[in-house]
Amino acid sequence: MVFEVGQIDWQSNAGLLLDRFAAALPPLPRLDINVFGSAPLQLFVERAFLSEDIDLFTTEDFSSPLDEFIRSRGWGKGQTDLYLQVCDPLAFDRVNRALSDFDPTLRAKLAAVRLPGARPA
């Protein structure tokens, strides 16, 4: 399945919060933010599917400042019913490092499973 920007349901609960979040971010520094967990399912598949949080992560350097930014806006855990949860980026780095020890064929298959819509190089 290939996900494209035009398919995002911005009127879903996750879409509305992420839209406000993106609009509030300063233009610099540019951040790469990854949204994962149930939020992408709500954005692309079924608007009714969502837990109480939107999981995201960025680089290790910006993880704490991003969490502070989110909390300053009232979008953190305990501040609102649907909240933004900044997760530890090192958890994903460990997975990537563990995958690098696998057989290349198996690693390619696992990468395709982990990254829906990713196209082979």
Image (tube, rainbow, N blue to C red):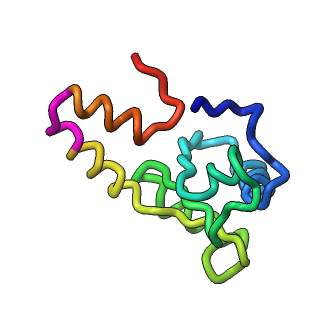
Q: Is residue 7 above or below residue 54?
A: above
Q: Nearer the viewer, residue 108 or 23?
A: 108
Q: Over which residues does the magenta segment extend?
A: 99-104
Residue at the outermost bottom position:
78
**Residue 26 on image: x %, y %:** 69, 48
Corner quadrant of residue 42: bottom right
Instruction: Where is residue 78? Give x, y as percent.
Output: 64, 83
The residue under the point 78% across, 49% down is: 23
Q: How many marks?
A: 0
* Residue, far top: 121
Q: Position of residue 46 (x, y in %)?
A: 72, 52
Say left or right for 3 vs 112. Answer: right
Image position of 44 with respect to 76: above or below:
above
Query: At 57% from the left edge and 32% from the top edge, which residue is drawn?
Result: 1
| Left or right placement of residue 103 versus residue 11 in this view | left
Residue shown at the point (29%, 43%) measured from the top left: 96
Q: Which residue sits at x=29%, y=49%?
A: 95
Q: Is residue 59 left or right of residue 46?
A: left
Q: Quadrant of the C terminus?
A: top left
**Does the magenta portion include 80?**
no
Residue 18: x and y in percent read 72, 54
Query: In the picture shown, does residue 89 fall above or below 82?
Result: above
Name the one closer to the observer, 116 or 54: 116
> Relative to 24, does residue 64 appear above or below in the rendering?
below
Q: Which residue reaches farthest right? A: 11
Along the line of sight, the residue nearer the viewer: 58 or 26: 58
